Amino acid sequence: MRIGVPTETAPGERRVALVPDIVRKLVAAGHEVVVEPGAGAGAGIEDSGYEEAGATLGAGVWDTEAVVKVAPPSPEETQRLGQGSVLIGFLAPRTNAEGVEAIAATGATAFAMESIPRISRAQSMDALSSQATVSGYHAVVMAAEEMPRFFPMLMTAAGTIPPAQVLVLGAGVAGLQAIATARRLGAVVTAFDVRSAVKEQIQSLGAKFFEVEGLGDASGEGGYARELSPEEQETQRAALQVQIAKSDVVITTALIPGRPAPKLITEEAVRNMRRGSVIIDLAAEAGGNCEGTKAGEIVRTDNGVAIDGSLNLPSRMPEHASRLYARNIESLLELMSGEEGALQLDFEDEVIETACVARDGKVA
């Protein structure tokens, strides 16, 4: 199979779809990898690293059998696809219908990494989880940098500094990583999730599980939470408001696939936070979990609270984010490989069938 790795052109995107270590494995398995010169620059990877791994540097990445990307292709890039091309990447099928339709119109077959089913044998391909790990970690680092107070408790000759109080809303992959990172920095961490099954995971990381009285389990399909009723949402917001006011940092990660992010933090709750407190809203792209969130911006309220709606946090740590993503891509390519590494798409396979978003000129 000939695999192409183009340079990412989306604004601010510094990741790359394959790194030299994974290229080396693919080449050893009989594949040919073509990398566009400079494709790894944003992640700190020199062209020479790809050449040493066995890749060919060249501009013909879009003429290969399988093009692997991180961000959705631009309209110009989409036009470089053709009948028989295979495109793999984050394609945002739920929010980028026009883009997916354009890909389908080229006759290419496209696979969205965010559509990989969450089943045991597809864990190594789960790019949403690998990138959420990066987001959860970096959210805490951002909060620590923004907050004008220490995270750990410090006992000094000049007095004792109490530890920061951190609240994490949502205990998926990003939330759990945020909990673990905040704990490593010495904060006292409380976490909330509407899925009661994650209580043990939260407690195993040394955090307190915040329980809302009268709110039952709200687990949904695929390990995500279901959408709460208006009454449940009001009960949740009222209970959280008290805990939010006690917190120096709130990190929100609550998402419902295909729907706007639930509003967990009201404007009143933000007004009750003390000056210097920080909210990192990882759901900003889906509308945000906080009523004051603005996607891609840091909002500073009149009472001195910072609401950070920064987007694409994994791209801020491009080296390790690329390494994790490349492993996900490698696993999917292995599944697509037949004898002697030839491209073989088995649409009876659950992973292949579910991840496919465009095929035979139509949106799948």
Image (cartoon, rainbow, N blue to C red):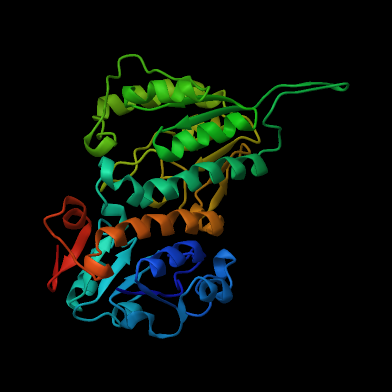
Quadrant showing the C terminus: bottom left
> Is 187 positioned to the left or the right of 347 in the image?
right
Q: Residue at x 42, y 63 (%)?
A: 25
Q: Position of residue 210 (x, y in %)?
A: 44, 20
Q: Residue at x 12, y 72 (%)?
A: 360
Q: Residue furthest top?
A: 213
Quadrant showing the N terminus: bottom left
Q: Position of residue 62 (x, y in %)?
A: 34, 80
Q: Tell me the quarter of the picture where residue 29 sits.
A: bottom left
Residue 357 higher or lower than 220, as above or below: below
> Is 126 positioned to the left or the right of 109 in the image?
right
Q: Residue at x 55, y 25 (%)?
A: 189
Q: Residue furthest bottom?
A: 59
Residue 228 higher or lower than 123, as above or below: above
Out of 234 and 192, give the one closest to the viewer.
192
Q: Note whether residue 311 is visible.
A: no
Out of 328 and 14, give the one closest to the viewer.
328
Out of 113 and 33, give the one closest to the viewer.
33
Number of numbered discs on residues:
0
Q: Tell me the quarter of the picture where residue 221 sits.
A: top left
Q: Note whether residue 20 is visible.
A: yes
Q: Tell me the quarter of the picture where residue 35 sits.
A: bottom left
Q: Position of residue 193 (x, y in %)?
A: 38, 28
Residue 315 higher or lower than 1, as above or below: above
Q: Position of residue 54 (x, y in %)?
A: 47, 74
Q: Residue at x 40, y 70 (%)?
A: 27
> Is 262 positioned to the left or the right of 324 in the image?
left
